[in-house]
Image: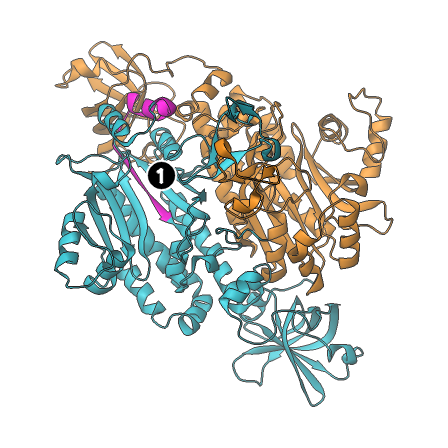
Chain colours: A cyan, B orange
Amino acid sequence: MKRIKIVHLLTSELPVNNVLIKGWVRTRRDSKGFSFIEVNDGSCLKNVQIIADSSLPNYPEIARLSTGSAVIITGDLVESKGAGQKWEIQANRVEIVSLAPDSYPLQKKRHTDEFLRTIAHLRPRTNKYGAIFRIRSELSYAIHKFFRDRGFKYIHSPIITGSDCEGAGELFRVTTLALENLPKQNGTADNTQDFFGTEANLTVSGQLSAEMFALALGDVYTFGPTFRAENSHTSRHVAEFWMVEPEMAFCNLEENMNLAEEMIKHLTTYILDECMDDIELFAKFVDKSLLSTLETVSSSDFERLPYQTAVEILKKSGQKFEYPTDFGKDLQTEHERYLTEHHFKKPLIVFDYPKTIKPFYMRVNNDNKTVAAMDVLVPKIGEIIGGSQREERLDILEKRMDETGMPKDAYWWYLDSRRFGSVEHSGFGLGFERFLMLMTGISNIRDVIPFPRTPNSIEF
Amino acid sequence: MKRIKIVHLLTSELPVNNVLIKGWVRTRRDSKGFSFIEVNDGSCLKNVQIIADSSLPNYPEIARLSTGSAVIITGDLVESKGAGQKWEIQANRVEIVSLAPDSYPLQKKRHTDEFLRTIAHLRPRTNKYGAIFRIRSELSYAIHKFFRDRGFKYIHSPIITGSDCEGAGELFRVTTLALENLPKQNGTADNTQDFFGTEANLTVSGQLSAEMFALALGDVYTFGPTFRAENSHTSRHVAEFWMVEPEMAFCNLEENMNLAEEMIKHLTTYILDECMDDIELFAKFVDKSLLSTLETVSSSDFERLPYQTAVEILKKSGQKFEYPTDFGKDLQTEHERYLTEHHFKKPLIVFDYPKTIKPFYMRVNNDNKTVAAMDVLVPKIGEIIGGSQREERLDILEKRMDETGMPKDAYWWYLDSRRFGSVEHSGFGLGFERFLMLMTGISNIRDVIPFPRTPNSIEF
């Protein structure tokens, strides 16, 4: 007999004799002459209810089945008389694979997210985290499919790198030098003895690599882990997170914004179509306004406005912000959320930021004050995408690198791309976890990642 | 007018007036009153030939178009009179976006792979490397689709980790400690001051994390970067590479082998179906036997035999091997290749390896000498997959950890999975780059990765 997963079992049209399921006990309760066992196998949010009759030979053992125990069940799929489910299984065999002790931490009660983070290896066994990680998987697939359907090629950009894309400097060092007995030269660490013969770090972005490939293959994207060694303890920061970074040759800022808007709407619609069972859990227990937020994101025309206009709106708003706004100051999350949640009540794209607050690679506009940057802002989150048209003019790029203190020698290869066949090109980065937070209403980024990495926290 | 990519242009059924293409000049040659320009946009291997008539207003500039220059062309798609192509474009406008200087390194001649590695940022602009990276992208997508179609959930396992999956020890350390001025305690590096408050490393495998999720969601897989700080200078080793690691609850060794075989055949067939244009380049220029190898892989029933039998075959073979074979010794690449290329002439799966040469997490067989391990061996490569049924019995797992010197305290969470709802489960790891080498006949792993990381090499 072939095992059937519960997600398929529960969509059966007709009763079926002799089905085989394998999973874990969520709850068990006794009735007169019966045990009702709720079994989940991770394939969907729903459990299947098993009716185990006291005539089963191992009924005394079945009656001791505890939450978290593993079982293999054969029986007949029959219409359920109970409320809330169409089907249940009348068991003719209940094999107990392993009995979880009473110390199993996930007993039937509400656990806090904080507690569940301490057992991150077990939390995907709960309804909420099972749902998150199924959505995370589906969203990943949707991203690959979105880009492939449009002719983009997927690039694996390097994780260990000698470059610092943003010039931001909050990097994790990667080394094979023995810290207990550091080899030294001239009083400092001898990098020539390190694995790569020089200093190496974890990447903060795949963009520069993706640019090299866009100028060869046309439209490309990366989807991989990126890192920030920021000592931040907020609910929006982790040290390790995944980014989606498309990069398009022959693409200007407007076309870049078009793709960003199309992608966000497409993915949101996809999740509403494909993951509704799991999404409903979040709409019910985590964020009552979730479905209306997702509808707004998937169906609105995103507002587009220059940074200058955004600043003026914020100044005229009469709102008290913690941080002041003025031309030349970066927008803070409070500003971004005001604009998207209160002023426009839908997603928006702010473009043409002051060049003083943006990295060297963004294309300088004719005003010589702003760059062809764009950020997509969405309700609950604020910035979810940052992107730009890239500076394709070698002389201006070199000037910007000098201004911002980027070492041109180390980037000879990047500059090569402007020497040989340079074209206008653009790209953006989507914070994958932030998008998941938008999709689920979850407010702490630690809760949408299998095993979050934050300062002083690396367990599992 | 909307731009059309060359991959779509060349499959046109009929002539089309007024098409717009954007790309880079591969070659240009003069004829009487014409320039023939070969343009590529990365969307496929093939170029489109442009006929630029000397009556075009900027013809003097067109006649100076150099290899690597960027162009935007409008014209009519017409049937080509030349050999080797169905369509060409009669240009009515040739806009020169940027003119590549004569120093452009990719002139029309054969370049060695070694040379191209020194310009890894430009090599995807060549026919060969464009083809590799298109296949790499397609294969990645095929992997996601394969697993999703079978109900597997995609897990992003952590890159920075406190664990050492294999106990192998060849790890990259990740740190924010200032190596120039290392904070010390008791004469050694003060790890408590490091970002994570303790030692952290780059992952060698996502398996242990994937196991935690398999025991919650059923069938899962990871597909992400993994790292080895081995000081190897072979054509098969890099410090950073991608692995595909499925992990299945309620799955024994045989079912694990079935999935591995099914996956390899499926992916090979997929690449033959979807990437034939690019594959043909490798069959022609890189490995004349490529197509027959791929046909064998996609259509053979993989031989399955115990390690013990494999050793006996090798001993009886009369072959001179560099390394001796005997029960308890690991198979070397020369042995693996002999078995698959010469003895069986098809892929094979060797299982039940001696426990002394395998990691702690593999399930101990009843003979107490072997473990339920399996390796898939393929022609040209040798081992392409390694996997096992995992030890689900807590007491035996603990004993194995003691025997192999794994610190049980640090793995309390891993042991938890055998305390609570433990079930038989299995998984394997596919070296993504090795599979790409099999698909293309490329013999150096550095040439199937965008920017390879090897000892003393971290450029780009």
Residue at 71 percent of width and 28 percent of height: B333
Q: Position of residue A342 (x, y in %)?
A: 22, 65
Residue at 74 percent of width and 29 percent of height: B332
What's drawn in magenta, residue-wise? A409-430
Q: Is residue B284 above or below residue A234?
A: above
What count of labels does the image hold? Answer: 1
Is A451 included in the stretch rendered in magenta?
Answer: no
Judging by the rendered image, the residue that carries numbered circle 1 is A168
Q: Position of residue B2 (x, y in %)?
A: 23, 39
Is A410 included in the stretch rendered in magenta?
Answer: yes
Q: Is residue A424 above or below residue A119?
A: above
Taking depth in this image into account, of A304 and B232 the one nearest to the observer is: B232
Q: Position of residue A158 (x, y in %)?
A: 47, 34
| Label 1: which secondary element | loop
Taking depth in this image into account, of A386 and A410 the one nearest to the observer is: A410
Label 1: chain letter: A
Q: Is A354 positioned to the left or the right of A242 in the image?
A: left
Q: Quadrant of the N terminus of chain A?
A: bottom right
Taking depth in this image into account, of A378 and B316 the one nearest to the observer is: A378
Within the image, what quadrant is residue B307 found in? top right
Q: Is residue A43 visible?
A: no
Q: Position of residue A188 (x, y in %)?
A: 50, 27
Taking depth in this image into account, of B267 and B186 the one nearest to the observer is: B186
Q: Is residue A271 above or below residue B426?
A: below
> Given the current orientation, which residue lies at the most extreme bottom position?
A32
Going by the numbered disc 1, the residue's amino acid type is Ala
Q: Is A161 positioned to the left or the right of A363 in the image?
A: right
